[in-house]
Image (cartoon, coloured by chain):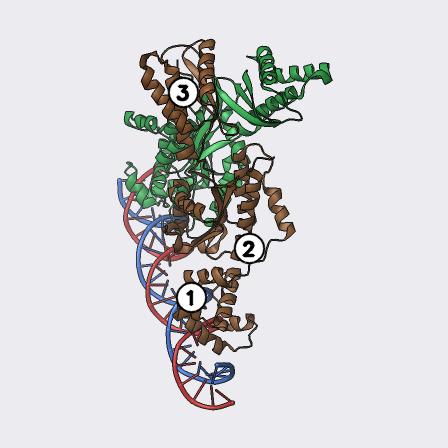
Chain colours: A brown, B green, C red, D blue
Amino acid sequence: MEAGLSERAQHLLKVLVERYIRDGEPVGSRTLSRDSDLELSPASIRNVMADLEELGFIVSPHASAGRVPTVKGYRFFVDTLLTVRPLAQQEIRLIRQQLDIGDPNPQALLASASSMLSAITHMTGVVTLPRREHIAWRHIEFLPLSDRRVLAILVVNEGEVQNRILNLDRSYDASALQQISNYLNRHFAGKDIHTVRSELLNELRRTRESMNNLMLAAITMAEKVFDARGAEEARNYVMAGEANLMEWAELSDVEKLRRLFEAFNQRHDILHLLDKCIAADGVQIFIGEESGYQVLDECSVVTAPYSVGDEVVGVLGVIGPTRMAYERVIPLVDMSARLLSAALNPRK
Amino acid sequence: MEAGLSERAQHLLKVLVERYIRDGEPVGSRTLSRDSDLELSPASIRNVMADLEELGFIVSPHASAGRVPTVKGYRFFVDTLLTVRPLAQQEIRLIRQQLDIGDPNPQALLASASSMLSAITHMTGVVTLPRREHIAWRHIEFLPLSDRRVLAILVVNEGEVQNRILNLDRSYDASALQQISNYLNRHFAGKDIHTVRSELLNELRRTRESMNNLMLAAITMAEKVFDARGAEEARNYVMAGEANLMEWAELSDVEKLRRLFEAFNQRHDILHLLDKCIAADGVQIFIGEESGYQVLDECSVVTAPYSVGDEVVGVLGVIGPTRMAYERVIPLVDMSARLLSAALNPRK
DNA sequence: TTTTGGCACTCGCCTATTGTGAGTGCCAAG
DNA sequence: CTTGGCACTCACAATAGGCGAGTGCCAAAA
C-alpha cells in the first residue's frame, strides 16, 4: 500500500528518482546516503531500498548495480513527490519568443509550437491539429478555369479556405457560375456544414433533373471539406525534433528507434493516444507502458490540451524517454498550452 | 588510367560490385573466382584485385577481409559497367498504382511520389516542390470577416489558391471591397505577378494619399505570394521513409543517423544538392562524398528532374546507402519522374 | 608470359578466463 | 533502529588463444 510509505522512504525515493533522472545511471546506497540530507549510513539506506524494491517502486537492472525507478516508481514520483517549480519569467519569455505568434496562418503557429517544445526539451514535440465541431459555411466562389474545369473556393469558419478543382460534364459561363454561387451563399451562409449538406441533398432529390450538376459538385466539395476537416486533418498532428530522441542513451538501440519512428509516421497509434489526452482537463502524463503502445514502452508522453474560445480543440505535448526531467517538462507543457491557446484565440 | 583497365579487370570489378551490393560483405578472391564465369583460380584473381586496389577502385577494410568498392569503383561501375534492365510492365504498373494520380491536389501527388519511392526501394524518397518561373495573377477576392479584418483570396496560375488574413486600419464595407477587387482583377488578370507588383507600386506612388490601404494590403499580399512561392515553398521538398535508412546495417551508427536526420530537417543542404540536379537533363547520381556534404558521405543520391509542360520544375529521387541496387534504382527513379510529369501535366 | 598451387602470414572475430569494483544482503554489535 | 563488517554477486574490461577468411609472394606448370 503506497500510503504506507514512511516519510523516510518517500524522501529517499524522491532523491533516487531525481538523481537517476539527472545522470541516467542506477543509483546505489552509497550515493543515495550522500545525496539525501538524512544522516544515514549506506547500510540503513539499503534496508529502505529493499523495502522500496519489494513494493515495486524500484528495481536493480542486475544484481550489482544500483536501483532504477520502475514505472510505478515514476508514477508515485510525479503524483505525490514532485515539486514543480513554476517557470521563471525568463523561461516564459523564451517560449513566447519561439512561438510564431502573429503568423496569420494557424498551421504555422502549431508547427512553431512543436518546434519550440522539441528545442527546449531536446525531445520530440507534438501538436495535434485543432478539431472543429462546427464548420460554418461562409462563402463559396466558382472560378472558370478552362472549358469544363472550375475552381471552387469554399470559405468556412473565420477565414479558412478550402479549394478544389471540379471536372464537370458540361461547361458553364461566368454568369451561370455567379448565379449558382449567389444562390448557395444566400441560402447557406452561416449554417453548419452538416445542415448544408443534408439540405442540399434534399433539394437535389426534390428537383432532380432540373438541378444542374455544379450544385452536385458543390455538395461533393462541401462533403469533402467536411471529411477533410473531421476525419483527416483534425486527426493529424505536427511533430518536430524526432531526431532528438537519438541523443538519449536509453533509446540508442537502432531497432527500437526504427519502430518508434515508424509509429510516428504511421500516426494512428500516436493519434489515438493523443486523443485520449484531449479529454483530460490539464496536464496528462503517460509513463512507459502506461500508454498501452509497445513502441512507447520506454518513453513518456506529457501533454496538455489547448483551446480556442472555451472549447478544447487539441493537445500539445512532448515525447521523450521515461527518464525525463518531469519537473521541468510538466510546467513547460502546461504553459505552452496556455500560450498557444492565447495565441489562437481571435484577437479582439 | 581507367581506360586502360583490361577487359578482365572490368568484368571482375563488375562482379565484385554486384556481389557486394547484393550481400554487403567484403568479397574475396575465392568467391569472386566462383562468381565470375571466367575459369580462373583465386590466385590469378588476386593479381587482378591487387591491380584494382592500386588503381583505387577497391579497398580492403582490413588486412584479411575481402575487398569493397571505393567511390571511384562505384562511379566506374555505374558509368560504364552497369547494365540497367528496363522496368517490367508489372513494375511500371506498381509505380502507377502507388502514385496518387487523380488527386486534384498536386501536393498530395508529390507526397505520394516520395512515399512510393521509399516503399519500393526501402530507402528514403524525396520530391522537391515545383518551382514556378511565372506566376500569373488570376483573380482576387476580399471577404469581410470582422470590423477591420478581411480575408484576401488570391488565385494564381491554373487554380492555385493563396489566402491571408489582413488586419486593416479602417473598415471597408462589402461594396468597397467589391470595387477594389473588381479594379484589381480588371487591370491585372493574366499578368505576371512581378509586373503586377511593380505596376501596383507605381500606381501607389503616383496617387499617394488618395489610394486606400486595402490596395496596399493587396500589394503586400501579392508580394507575399511571390515570396512564398519563389523562396520558401519552391525551395522545399517532401520526404518519406526516412526511418527506412535505419534498416541498413552500414548506417546503423546512431550518431551518424542523427546527423543525417538533422540534415533532413535542416533542409538547406539537401535542397542545395537537389537544386544542382534540376539542371541535369536526366538521371543524376551522387555517390558518397561526391555530394560534397559530409553527412551524406556514406549515402548515394539518385535523382531525375520532372516537368510541367516543357519546363523542368523539380526533381525527385532516392537517398540511400552507397551500397544500393543502382541497376534497379536508376530506371525506377527515371520512370517515376516520367510518370510524375505525365500526371502533373494538365489533362487534356 | 600467364596461370596456378603452395605456403606463411595477417588480422578481425568469437570464446573463455580472469580480475576489478560497485553494490548488495545479512548479521551481529552498538 | 542503526551501523560496521563481511561474504557474495555480477556486469564490465582486459587478456589470451583458436579459428578462419583472405592476402601476398614465389616457384613451378602451362
Residue identified by numbered label 1: A57
Q: Is mark 3 on a helix, strand or loop?
A: helix
On the question of residue A303 being in view, the answer is yes
Point out the tag, 3 or 1, that comes first from the N-terminus.
1
Q: Nearer the viewer, mark 3 or mark 1?
A: 3
Label 3: chain?
Answer: A
Distance in Å between CA atoms under marks 2 and 3 = 50 Å
Residue identified by numbered label 2: A328
Both on one chain, marks 2 and 3?
Answer: yes
Q: Which residue is drawn at 36% across and 41% down?
A: B20
Point out the tag, 1 or 2, that comes first from the N-terminus.
1
Q: Residue at x 61, y 27 (%)?
A: B147
Callout 3, which amino acid?
Answer: Ala
Residue A300 placement (x, y as % from top left): 45, 53
The image quarter in which residue A211 lies:
top left
| Above or below, B114 relative to A171 | below
The image quarter in which residue D18 lies:
bottom left
Q: Nearer the viewer, residue A187 or B219?
A: A187
| Above or below, D3 relative to B315 | below
Q: Is mark 1 on a helix, strand or loop?
A: loop
The image quarter in which residue B122 lies:
top left
Distance in Å between CA atoms under marks 3 and 1 = 60 Å
Residue B346 placement (x, y as % from top left): 42, 16
Residue A225 placement (x, y as % from top left): 42, 28
Q: Which of A345 and A118 is in front in this view?
A: A345
Point out the tag, 2 or 3, that comes first from the N-terminus.
3
Seen in the image, is B78 located left or right of residue D18?
Answer: right
Residues tagged 2 and 3 counted as in contact (Cβ below 8 A)? no
Q: Residues within 10 Å of mark 3 (few under 14, many from 20)?
A: many
Callout 2, which amino acid?
Answer: Arg
Residue identified by numbered label 3: A218
Label 1: chain?
Answer: A
